[in-house]
Image: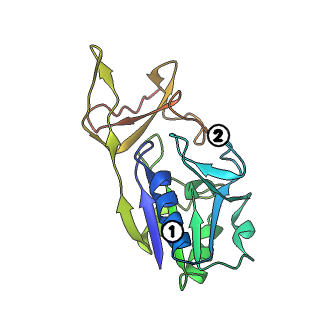
Amino acid sequence: MIEFITGCMFCGKTEELIRRMRRESISGKKVVLFKPKIDNRYSEEYVTTHDGVSFRCITAENSDDLYGYDADVIGIDEVQFLDDGVVRFCRKFRNKLIIVSGLNTDFMGKPFKFKDSERHVGELMAMSKVYYLSAICTYRENGEICGREANFTQRLANGKPVYHDDKLVVIGGKEQYEARCEKHFVIEEN
């Protein structure tokens, strides 16, 4: 079975993935958690939430690095940063419990493409049980936070939305990204 935890940044995807991995581990199952090597924000040895909650992991340069581990439950954080071979991996091992988390859309609101591919996470979502999470819109106007339900990831540079033709992958946190509602999500054109 494949479960896909998705939503915009700051909605709690990694937190939920870690919670599920801990539950499975407590039940006596062998678990292994992976994260893409590119995600080096907090630690190479741990998947870590923005709030500092962590779980030991194995870093993967690409989907080939996911093979060869003895586990009942396989977790993959930030799945959108891997190559499209992760789809084949998940299909091959779906007799196990595979729990992935990742962004469903990029900073332009388009389906997030896998590394070096035109294929996107929607293909993996189509074969998964999908859990959508949302955040709170942190757009500020007159000193007040919007507070609406947020389903979009806004990339910022110097506090302003970046242009649509900016680099697709920029690893970062609250200094470069905000969760936004539909009203406050902006795609800047050149």
Of the image marks 2 and 1, the number of the one nearer the N terminus: 2
Counting from the top left corner in percent of width and height, residue 83 is at: 65, 61
- Residue at 48% across / 46% down in the picture? 106
Query: Helix or strand or loop: what does disc 1 sit on?
Result: strand
Q: Nearer the viewer, residue 116 or 128?
A: 128
Relative side of 164 to 116, left or right: left
Residue lying furthest bottom in this view? 95
Q: Is residue 85 above or below residue 171?
A: below
- Residue at 50% across / 40% down in the picture? 51
Counting every numbered tag in the picture gives 2
Residue identifier under label 2: 41
Counting from the top left corner in percent of width and height, residue 174 is at: 50, 31
Residue 137 shows up from this direction: yes
Counting from the top left corner in percent of width and height, residue 35 is at: 64, 57
Q: Nearer the viewer, residue 136 or 104?
A: 136
Q: At label 2, which amino acid type do we have?
A: Arg
Is mark 2 in CB contact (under 8 Å) with mark 1?
no
Task: Check disc 1: other Cα within 10 Å, few if <14, some if 14-19, many if 20+.
Answer: many
Check residue 99 in the rendering and tell me which mark sits there, or answer none. Answer: 1
Residue 115 image-quadrant placement: bottom right
Task: Check disc 2: other Cα within 10 Å, few if <14, some if 14-19, many if 20+.
Answer: few
Q: Nearer the viewer, residue 149 or 184?
A: 149
Residue 111 shows up from this direction: no
- Residue at 32% across / 21% down in the picture? 140
Relative side of 170 to 101, left or right: right
Distance Cα–Cα, label 2 vs label 1: 21 Å
Q: At label 1, which amino acid type do we have?
A: Ile
Residue 167 image-quadrant placement: top right
